[in-house]
Image (cartoon, rainbow, N blue to C red):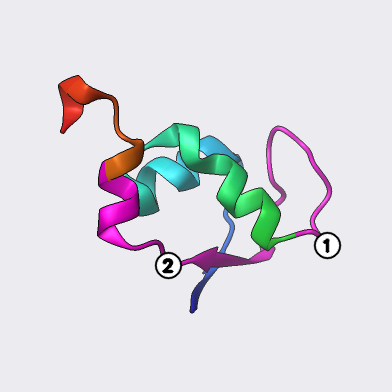
Amino acid sequence: MYLTHITTAGERWDQLAARYYGDPMLYQDLIAANPQVPLVSVLPSGLPLSIPIIEQARLHEELPPWKR
């Protein structure tokens, strides 16, 4: 299951991961879900991205112990 996000000027993969998952290090999940998007550090505006919905249990497992 996915959400759709339309980028705005200046957004980055890590910012989107932090917004949707609470952890900027999960940006790889966003990149993997959007293979059609070029790997650039700053995304262009108006780009539709698929945001995978990640289970809360998985998010909790990936947090470092001091954030659990």
Considering only vertical position in the picture, is 42 above or below 58?
A: above
Q: Position of residue 18 (x, y in %)?
A: 39, 41
Amino acid type indicated by mark 1: Gln
Side of 22 where 1 appears, left or right: right
Q: Nearer the viewer, residue 5 or 62?
A: 62
| Residue 41 picture location, percent across and down | 71, 32
Circle 2 SS class: loop
Q: Is residue 23 left or right of residue 51?
A: left
Decide whether residue 8 is among the magenta residues: no
Q: Which residues are magenta?
A: 35-60
The residue wearing badge 2 is 53
Residue plotted at (71% across, 61% down): 34
Tell me, yes or no, whether the highlighted magenta stretch contains residue 44: yes
Find disc 1 in the rendering and name its residue.
Answer: 36
Asked if residue 50 lies left or right of residue 21, the reply is right
Q: CA distance from mark 1 to mark 2?
A: 19 Å
Nearest the viewer among 12 and 3 is: 3
Residue occupying image coordinates x 48% and y 47%: 16
Sequence-earlier tag: 1 or 2: 1
